[in-house]
Image (cartoon, rainbow, N blue to C red):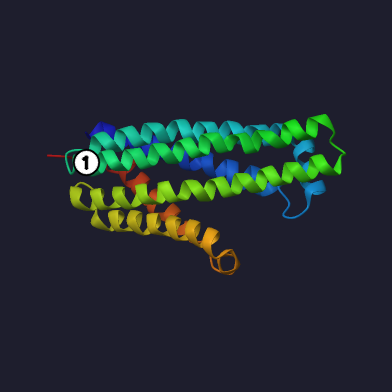
Amino acid sequence: MNRWARLAGVFYLITIVAGVFAEVFVRGRLVVRDDAAATATNILTHEALYRSGLVADLIMLLAYVAVTLLLYLLLKPVNEPLSLLAAFFSLIGIAVLAVNCLNHVAPLLLLARDPSSTQSQSLALLALRLHARGYSISGVFFGTYCILIGYLTFKSGFVPRTVGVLMAIGGASYLADSFLLFLLPAVSVRLPDFTMLGGIGELALTLWLIVKGAKVS
């Protein structure tokens, strides 16, 4: 069990690093809000970087599948039905993001046909906006997953309860961010980024698993 816990932590760290790289250092750097022409120019000028973002997304998803399996095995003794339910929510979220990767590929295909076309540039930016919404949809499933994992780790005894609480708060922040965006978009843009809380919770669990592992009786 201790080995599984450390391995889960390693895969979780890969998930976080790959996800941050793709979202912050690739899309965050190349996508210019409400400027299709500038975004298209950035993608074509830094095409290798843009493609590496897709690779990072795929690595993130592969690593998260491993995390899901390992945490299921680790937390099954605590409450098997809830651990299985959490795994299902995680896998659905992973599937949503896997399909969502097509929205990262779409700008490359659109701009390859006619990079100077205003229509192609606009459609490329639209695809990237849809990509962002895909992340928000997946947040519903990952948020529920984090809440369940937070509860299970809280009850487990091999992880500090504060880590479980942070995971549950993080999951609630993912849910709040997603539902606010779809129900009250005007309000959502004026509020702080709740997903930072989710990142804190997941990072806390990741570091604990890597450093301390888990001793399950």
**Is the C terminus in the top left, top right, bottom left or bottom right quadrant?**
top left
Query: Residue at left 30%, top 47%?
Result: 149
Percent across and percent down for residue 109 are 74, 31
Residue 138 in sight from this viewpoint: yes
In this rendered view, identify the residue nearer to me: 63 or 13: 63
Q: Residue 99 occupies which quadrant of the picture?
A: top right
Relative to 154, residue 57 above or below: above
Hey, what amino acid is under mark 1? Pro
What residue occupies the far front of the structure in this picture?
183
Residue assigned mark 1: 81
Residue 95: x percent and y percent? Answer: 47, 35
Most foreground residue, 4 or 119: 119
Tell me the residue at 48%/46% (across/down). 138
Where residue 118 appears, x then y in whole percent? Answer: 85, 44
At 39% from the left and 49% from the top, the residue drawn is 202
- Say if 168 sits above or below 1 in the image: below
Q: Secondary structure at mark 1?
A: helix
Where the N terminus falls, by quadrant?
A: top left
For mark 1, does the 10 Å Cα neighbourhood hold few (<14), some (14 to 19), or many (20 or more) residues? few
Most extreme residue toward the left, as rendered?
217
